[in-house]
Image: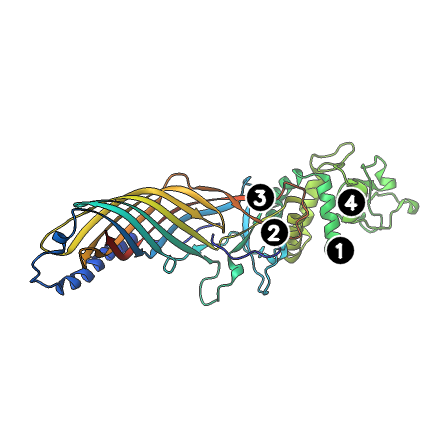
Amino acid sequence: MGRLRKGPSVLGVRYMSAKNYNNLFLGSIMMSLAVLITCQGAQARGAEKSTFELRKPQYFYVGLDYSPAFSNIRDFTIQESSGETKAIYPYISEEKDIILKANRFDWNMPNPRIGFKNSMLMAAGNSIGYAMGGMRLEIEVSHQHFKSQGRYIGNKKEEESDTIYLLAKELGHSAVTEKTEDLISALTKVKGEDIVRFANALEKARPDIAKKICRTRSIPGGKNYGKYNTYTSWFKDTNNLTALCGDIGGNSNKQEHHNMIQNSFKDFARETLVGESTNWPTTTGDNVRGNDNAKALADELITLLSREEKITVAGLMANTIEGGEVVDIGAISSTSVMVNVCYDFLSKEVSIVPYGCMGLGSNFVGIVKGHLTPKPAYRVKAGVSYRLSSGIDIFAAGFYHRVFGSTEYTDIPVEYLIDDVSPYGRTKETAMANFRMSYAGGEFGMRFAF
C-alpha cells in the first residue's frame, strides 16, 4: 500500500499551436514525396510490364508502420469522483522508497503545471484492408504513449515520484493557503468527533502545535484563565467555565475564583467536545453566535501557526478528517481502432501513388495503469506509397488524429495515504479527469498484398 508502482497515466499542459500542426502535417507529406521521388529515380525505365499490371485489381493487404506523434493535450484537470478536490499537490520526497504519507507532498506548490511529451518510441500501428482499384477499406490499430513530463523541466533527472499527486480537499488546502473564510466554511461541515480525532492526532504527532491552539486567555495583568466546560456558564466571571475555543477567563478580583491553569486544544476536545457533536460548530449557552467555535479555531490555525506548522496541520486534517486520494499520472496512452476509407491516385506511368484517407473509430485512453476509457475519434491522413514489387509497397504520410465527444474520463483508480484514518467513505475509490486530446505526426511503413 505504501508504494505506488510506476505505470501509464491539474492542471494546464503544453500544447502545439494550430499553425505548428499544419506545418507538421504538410512537412510529413513533403518529406514523403522527397523520399519516394528519390526511389522512383532508381526504377528501371525499360520494364516491359509495370508493377500495377502485375497486381490483381482486387486484393487484401496488411500494413505495419512506425508513427511518431506530437501531443496536443489541453485543459487537463483531475479530481476525486465526488468533486471535492480543491487542489493537487506533488510528491517531493527524494528518498529511494515511495511512501504515501501526507508529509511527503509539497504543500507549498498547489496545482503544478503538467506537460506531456511527444510519442516517439512507443508509436506503432498495423492495418488490414481490402483494395478495389483505387479504393481501399481498412481497419487500422495504432498506439501512442505520451509520457508525463512532471513538474520539473530542465536538467533535473526525472524520478518515478515526479508524477505522483495528492488530491487535497477543502480543509487542508484552506489551511495552507490561509483562506480563513473557506476554512470556517469547511469546519462547519464536519462533526465534533472529527475535531476530537484531529486534536488527538495533533497532540500525539506535534504537541508543541497543539499547545498553541484553543489556548485559553486571561484578563490583562492577571492569571485567571478560561476553563473548558460543556457550556459557557452564566457565572463565568467567577467560575471561568467556557465552551468557546480560546476564550478569556473571568474578571473576578477574588483570588479564590482564579483559574491558574491554562487550557489548550486537548482540553477543549476532552472537556468541551467530549467526543460527540456537543459545542460544534457552535457553543452551548445563551447569547452565542452561530459557528463561533468553528470561527475561533479557523482564526487560530491561520494567525497563530507558522508556515511549517500549517503544513503539518493540513496533512493531519487529510489523514483524520477529510481523507485524500493519490494518483500517478505517469503517461496518457492512446490505442485507436479506426475504420479508414482511402483512395489511391493510381497511374500506370509511375510507381509513386499519392493517397488520402479518412477514418472513424474509437480511442482507448489510459491515464493510470490498468484502466482504459473508450472515446470516439477520427483520423485524416495523406501521403504517398511506392511499389517495390507486385506484393510490397512502402509508404509515408502525415496524419491528424482527434478524440471528440465528452472530455470526461471517469472511474480512474486511486491509491490511499497509508496513514489515513478518516471515517469510511471520506476517501473516495476513484477519480475523474477532464481534458481535450488530439495529436499529429507521420507514419512510415510497408504494406504486403496477397
Secondary-structure class at tag 3:
loop
Q: Amino acid at mark 4?
A: Phe
Dot 1 or dot 4: first in sequence order is: 1
Query: How many numbered dots are placed on residues in this image?
Result: 4
Q: CA distance from mark 1 to mark 4?
A: 14 Å
Residue 227 appears at what percent x and percent y? 83, 44
Dot 1 or dot 3: first in sequence order is: 1
Residue 316 appears at what percent x and percent y? 67, 51
Q: Is residue 168 left or right of residue 361?
A: right
Q: Is residue 287 left or right of residue 49?
A: right
Residue 53 appears at what percent x and percent y? 12, 52
Q: Quadrant of residue 342?
A: top left
Dot 1 or dot 2: first in sequence order is: 2
Assess whether mark 3 and mark 2 are in contact (beta carbons under 8 angstroms): no
Q: Is residue 127 among the parts visible in the rendering?
A: yes
Q: CA distance from mark 1 to mark 2?
A: 19 Å
Q: Which residue is mark 2?
A: 176
Q: Which residue is mark 3?
A: 429
- Residue at x-position 44% and y-position 51%: 12
Residue 417 appears at what percent x and percent y? 62, 51
Crowd class of label 2 (few under 14; some 14 to 19; many from 20; radius 10 Å): many
Q: Amino acid at mark 3?
A: Glu
Q: Which residue is mark 1?
A: 207
Dot 2 or dot 3: first in sequence order is: 2
Q: Is residue 380 left or right of residue 78?
A: left
Assess whether mark 3 and mark 4 are in contact (beta carbons under 8 angstroms): no
Dot 2 or dot 4: first in sequence order is: 2
Q: CA distance from mark 2 to mark 3?
A: 25 Å
Say which of marks 4 and 3 sits in front. 3
Q: Amino acid at mark 2?
A: Val
Assess whether mark 2 and mark 1 are in contact (beta carbons under 8 angstroms): no
Q: Residue 268 got which mark?
A: 4
